[in-house]
Amino acid sequence: MQKIKIEVINMAKDLPLPAYQTELSAGMDLLAAVEEDIILEPGEIRLIPTGLKIAVPDGYEAQIRPRSGLALKHGISMVNCVGTIDADYRGEVGVILINHGQKPFPIARGERIAQMVINPIVQADFTLVESLDDTERGEGGFGHTGR
């Protein structure tokens, strides 16, 4: 298990730290650290604070992902759909939510709004070439193999 330092901003001191909900969960829930309940109107985009700062270790990233239950039941997702917290970022973790649903969605203090997954990363070193190797697929993309 990877150790990660976390700082809780005053506005979130009363909220639980991110936690795995089951033994084999990949993601930890992030909670809304809003001062008072807010309403996310249909089509509205809003940055929701978590009240957390984290120090992701070198060689890792924290991915912030939408919660599938909110997406299915209410049309709530993230505008950037997977946010990345880099190892050198030290600001507050925020979640950019959007309401794709047809009804206003209330967000209460402490509500689970996203999940955070810690992943190892590999940095690439590009090599410029005149052309790439041929493959069976070639340049086919965007559904070229059918449904």
Image (cartoon, rainbow, N blue to C red):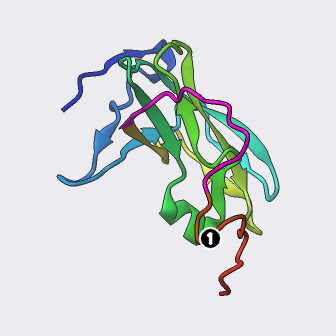
Residue displayed at 35% across by 35% down: 18
24 relative to 4, above or below = below
- In depth, the one of 50 and 88 nearer the eye is 88
Residue beneath disc 1: 137
Residue at 68%, 44% (x, y): give it.
80
In the rendered view, would you say 114 is above or below 77? above
Query: In the drawing, does residue 30 fall left or right of residue 78?
Result: left
Q: Is residue 23 left or right of residue 124?
A: left
Residue 104 covered by magenta stretch: no
- Element at badge 1? loop
Let me know if residue 128 is in the magenta part.
yes
* Residue 24: % across, % down: 21, 54
Image spot of residue 105 (x, y percent): 67, 57
Q: Position of residue 1 (x, y in %)?
A: 18, 32
The residue under the point 72% across, 56% down is: 99
Most common SS among magenta residues = loop
As drawn, 35 above or below 25: above
Q: Residue furthest right?
A: 43
- Residues 40 and 22: in front is 22
- Residue most extreme to the bottom: 147
Quadrant into which the C terminus falls: bottom right
Q: Amino acid at mark 1?
A: Arg
Q: Residues within 10 Å of mark 1 (few under 14, many from 20)?
A: few
Residue 12 placement: quadrant: top left
Instruction: Please provide percent x and percent y for residue 129.
Output: 68, 36
The region drawn magenta spans: 119-133
